[in-house]
Amino acid sequence: MDPNSIQAVREAYTTIVHDQTTSPTVSKLNQLRHFLLSNGFLQDDPRFRDIYAMADSSPSNSETPPASPASSDSTPRASSSIKSRASFDIPLAENVVDRAFNGGLAIPDLPRFMAGVRNIFDKVASQVSGGKVASYIPQLASVDPDLFAVSFCSIDGQRFSFGDSNVEFSIQSCCKPISYSIALEEVGATKVHQHIGREPSGRSFNHMSLLDRKIPHNPMINAGAIMSSSLIQRGNPLYKRFSKVSKVWTQLFGGKRISFNNSIYLSEKETADRNFALAYMMKEAGAFPEGTDIKDTLEFYFQCCSLEADSDRMAIMAATYANGGVCPLTGETVFEASTVRNCVSLMASCGMYDYSGEWNFSVGLPAKSGVSGAIWVVVPDVGGFCCYSPCIDSIGNSRRAVEFFKALSDTYAFHMLEPARLRGLKNDPTLSPLPRAGVMKSSKRNNSNTSGNSGKSAGSGEDEEISVATQLARTLSLSNGNITQSPMSDSVGPSSPVRHALSVSSGLSTSSTSARSGAGVNSKLVPEGMERSSSKGKFRKSVVEWFNKKEEEELGGR
């Protein structure tokens, strides 16, 4: 936005939240509305629901209503009645709006990030197939195998979705981290881990095996989740136990309600021989707390697996975990930070069944999958994703969702163990755009639909291809020229001048004496057309100028 528009947005927001005597003009209110939407704050966001309601109830710009008592001019003004609603949390909303004005949001340039994610989504949708819908639970076998959805929510509550994001699906094993977290909150980690281990099993999710201590390996497999269920609201009747879990899910969703599918529940019960066997195996081993009712525990476990949600709500939940247990949309602390740390740690090592090791190697993010075809992923201190596609592989993970997150990790610097010198070679959407005229000139991001549910985003692969140059230029600018040598992944960036230019980094390694002193750039590594200089500052400027020039050439050739 240009400075005048930003000033108009600031004035409208200040009037709404602080001035009880004056209403903002309709024009400024509409600019504020656009500003919020473009930053991913959707109309159902409880922090801004009243602002959107005010905008929707105000006269159009073409109308000229009578002047309000607070104003003697004839400029159309918005209704002021909505801003006094108790549901409008001014401090919570103001905090995030201030950061949006200052470029301090978790994803500063959301439209560009949306375009990149949309590009990955479209490629996976068109190129990835295979797998089968889960059939061992009869009700799941009737699901449309072509459904595909991706949703994202940042730790600031910036949201977007693509595909079938409003279609509810059975949560299944995606409930296991939440049940484990509730158990941790209620009885503490020491008590929980007297009955549940913290080790990957290396076996299928319903394998008949226990640790040497005669307890289930971890809470992310069936045996461990059954044990978690036995620890929640102990001594209370089933309806109170289920009510507790439902309330926590609603808190994780920012006030959006969780659904329950009774048909799935009945189907789960009718095909539960293996889960009954697991429970009685643990009972025989003395793994359960004393006095545990096996039948009630299994009933409760089946109920938790039969909850339903869509990818949008699941992404909000994932963002709550990414935000240390605080829901981005409400500011409510759902789980303590220590609970989140423990849960996310086990999601990273055990959340993808016996594919967890490969997942951690390839994707490097805490995740939990379910046989319904959903995978939710935590990007710590950034946000949360949920991807849903019903066709699963032989392990029980969604084929398309796995490939989507592989491509996401290849493209963006999200891997938990990404070294700093590799991060510079990937797109980092958490960085503010480099303030240079023309960098974003060809971006079609203004045509993006923030809700992401209708039509294809105008952003495309072409935009993302050149972003590596922008990111490296940004890294140079922020690091004062201290670039480190990095191998170039085949999956990152274009292959021509940009890939060649990245090799200049080895001449400026921060670990070398020559780099720290600003002396001696290896002339063999400097691309043709780039000025060589013994001055680190001049060389950094030369690199940035060279990338800008190459980027403009690529833009001109499109």
Image: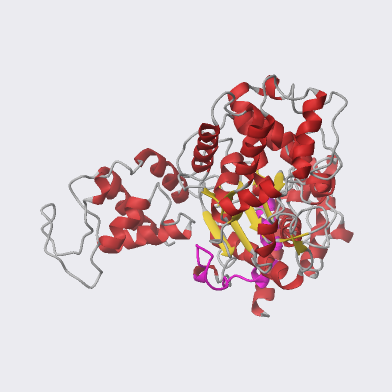
Residue 148 occupies quadrant? bottom right
Q: In this picture, is 459 found above or below 308?
A: below
x, y percentage for residue 89? 36, 41
483 and 260: which is toward the camera: 260
x, y percentage for residue 22? 19, 50
Residue 43 occupies quadrant? bottom left
Q: In this picture, is 423 found above or below 503?
A: above
Question: What residue is rendered at 62% in x and 60% in y?
Answer: 150
Please give left or right for residue 201 compared with residue 223 in the image: right
In the image, residue 71 lies in the stretch drawn in magenta: no
x, y percentage for residue 204? 83, 45
x, y percentage for residue 193? 73, 24
140 and 552: which is toward the camera: 140
* Residue numbers of the magenta segment: 447-476
Q: In this picture, is 242 found above or below 118?
A: above
Please give left or right for residue 441 compared with residue 554 in the image: left
Asked if residue 285 can be seen in this view, the reply is: yes
In the image, residue 465 lies in the stretch drawn in magenta: yes
455 and 181: which is toward the camera: 181
Q: What sort of colour scheme is used for the picture?
A: secondary structure
Q: How many marks?
A: 0
Question: What residue is rendered at 50% in x and 62% in y?
Answer: 451
Q: Quadrant of the C terminus?
A: bottom right
Please give left or right for residue 117 compared with residue 332 in the image: right
Asked if residue 345 can be seen in this view, the reply is: no
548 and 286: which is toward the camera: 286
Question: What residue is rendered at 69% in x and 49% in y?
Answer: 270
Q: Quadrant of the N terminus?
A: bottom left
Residue 473 occupies quadrant? bottom right
